[in-house]
Structure formats: structure tokens, C-alpha cells
Amino acid sequence: MFPTSTGSATFSADALLKADRPQPRPLWLQALLFGAVFLLLQSGFGALRGTWVERLAIDTVTVKSAAWSFRALTPEVAVEAVGTRLKAPGGGINIINGCEGTEVLFLLYAAFVAALLP
């Protein structure tokens, strides 16, 4: 509520929106935060190569969920998850480190952090 020249109080949506909006961070600071978060996530996952974390990310999260999705969408194709491989009649695919999509997720997480943190 804001006083007017007549002495009564009125609501102004524009004034309320402007008053509650935080000042945006400078672009260079957002870019620096984005790069730092991405570098931290990427180097952290790189340091865990060959460990149970990598096997969890590739074997369980990526391969098993992809096999489940294939079976749900096309039940006539018998796709099964075997380690890092998706096997199906007539072919298959081997998902190796670097092909599991973690880099894309890290880019997305870094963008959210840089854009949404106050």
C-alpha cells in the first residue's frame, strides 16, 4: 500500500514487483560461478573414474534405466542390461565413460546454480 495525494492508500503492482526484486548479479560473476561449478563437478567425477561411483552412474543409473525405458516403450523388443551394455536381438550398444551424459547434467546444474542462487 502506498499513500496517494488524496491521503488514501492504494496498491501498485509495479511498485511491489520492483521493491521485492533482488538486484541481478553481474554477468561476469555469473559466468565465473557457472565455470567454477562445472569445473568442480567435472573434475570430481573424473577423479572417481574406476570406482563404484562410476559403475553406479554407468551400469545402474544409465544402462538399467535405458533398458527399462526400452522395455516400457517397445515391449516386443527384448532389451536387457548387462554391465555397461544394452543387448537386444540383432544388436546392442556399449555405454562407456563419456557417453553416459554426465557432462550435460553438469552443464545444466552449473547453469541453475549460476542463474538461481541469490
Image: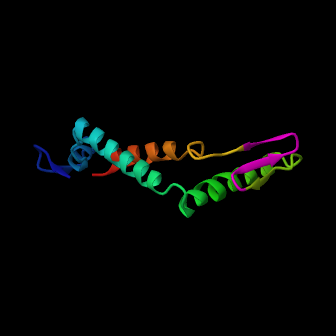
- The residue range painted magenta reads 83-93
Q: Quadrant of residue 83?
A: bottom right
Question: Considering depth in this image, is 15 or 11 the residue closer to the camera?
Answer: 15
**Residue 81 magenta-highlighted:** no
Q: Report x, y in % for residue 70.
A: 77, 47
In screen coordinates, is 107 left or right of 54?
left
Magenta stretch, main secondary structure, is: strand
Q: Report x, y in % for residue 45.
A: 46, 53
Q: Quadrant of residue 35?
A: top left
Q: Report x, y in % for residue 23.
A: 21, 44
Give the residue at the far top of this rendering.
27
Give the residue at the far front of this rendering.
50
In screen coordinates, is 17 left or right of 69?
left
Question: Considering depth in this image, is 5 or 23 the residue closer to the camera?
Answer: 23
Residue under the point 50% across and 42% down: 104
Residue under the point 75% across and 55% down: 82
Residue under the point 87% across and 39% down: 90
Residue under the point 75% across and 54% down: 68
